[in-house]
Amino acid sequence: MAELDRRVAIVTGGARGIGRGCAHALAERGLAVALVDILTDEMSDTRAEVEARGAPCLAFEADVADHVRAKEVAGSVLDRWGRIDVLVNNAGRPMPTGILDLSEEQWDTTIDVNLKSCFNYIQAVAPTMLAREYGRIVSMSSLNAHSGGVTAAVSRVAYAAAKAGIIGLTRSLAKELGPHIAVNCVCPGLIKTELAQKNPVIATREPELVRGIALNRTGSPRDVAELVAFLATVEPCFVTGQDITIDGFQWNR
């Protein structure tokens, strides 16, 4: 087993959007980065961008809802680098369907990708973090966990429920895994990712939505990534069990 001098991060959903931004920000802070995603072409691009920032990078094609695969990915990272210091649970998917039309399969898939994936990867990395008495876990919740998703077409009941579950998971695990592992989540508001830009409802309503944001703009993946990188690397760290909203103060939510 090779031992890497620098700290190591796993970023799920790391191929694009906020995940790509997190991978960049962590690499710029000197961490080695392991990417996990099903979007192999985009993940290959992100890997090249991470390496261009001087950081080692691995890429794993994996469905984050697959519990066995999560343990395989963690094992491969340990075999290659000998440590896992940071986990960023970023993978997720929208679900715009309302409760009356939502199928059981849509509900299950939304919960699996957004919430179960966090369980999968936390359970896979927690043993090595506990053994080393160090770890940082940051999971991607959403403003919609608090608001119910009233202003965005990507975030109705199943999505909001999954993201709210991440907050409960975070608070519970901060107690269970402390004092050596800090566990937090972030709740982005309107972030202009590639996926959001393809959403016709958001695209047509962007000027209206921005008027309700105190900073008068949409957020960027980099905005969120800087907060994630802070939680992943700040020393000393006295922040755990928190859900931190990053939305430019969306006062009309």
Image: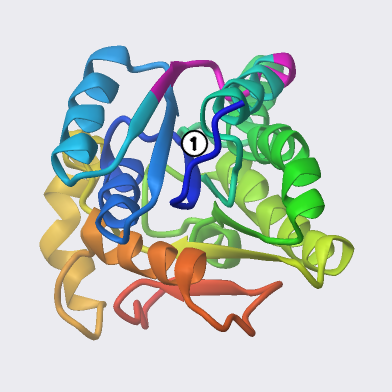
Q: From what the image shows, is residue 99 above or below residue 41?
A: below
Identify the residue position indicated by label 1 in the image.
92
Q: Residue at x 60, y 35 (%)?
A: 82
Camera-side residue of 86 and 163 = 86
Q: Residue at x 17, y 76 (%)?
A: 211
Instruction: Classify residue 5 as left or right of residue 209.
Output: right
Q: From what the image shows, is residue 198 above or below residue 135?
A: above
Q: Hey, which quadrant is residue 16 in on the image?
A: top left
| Residue 101 belongs to magenta span | no
On the image, the x and y values in percent for residue 34 come to 43, 33
Question: What residue type is disc 1 on?
Answer: Gly
Camera-side residue of 102 and 48 = 48
On the image, the x and y values in percent for residue 98 come to 55, 36
SS for dot 1: loop
Q: From what the image shows, is residue 47 above or below residue 238?
A: above
Q: Which residues are magenta?
A: 59-68
Quadrant of the snapshot with the C terminus: bottom left
Q: Residue at x 48, y 42 (%)?
A: 4
Q: Residues within 10 Å of mark 1 (few under 14, many from 20)?
A: many
- Does residue 90 appear anywhere in the picture? no
Quadrant of the snapshot with the N terminus: top right
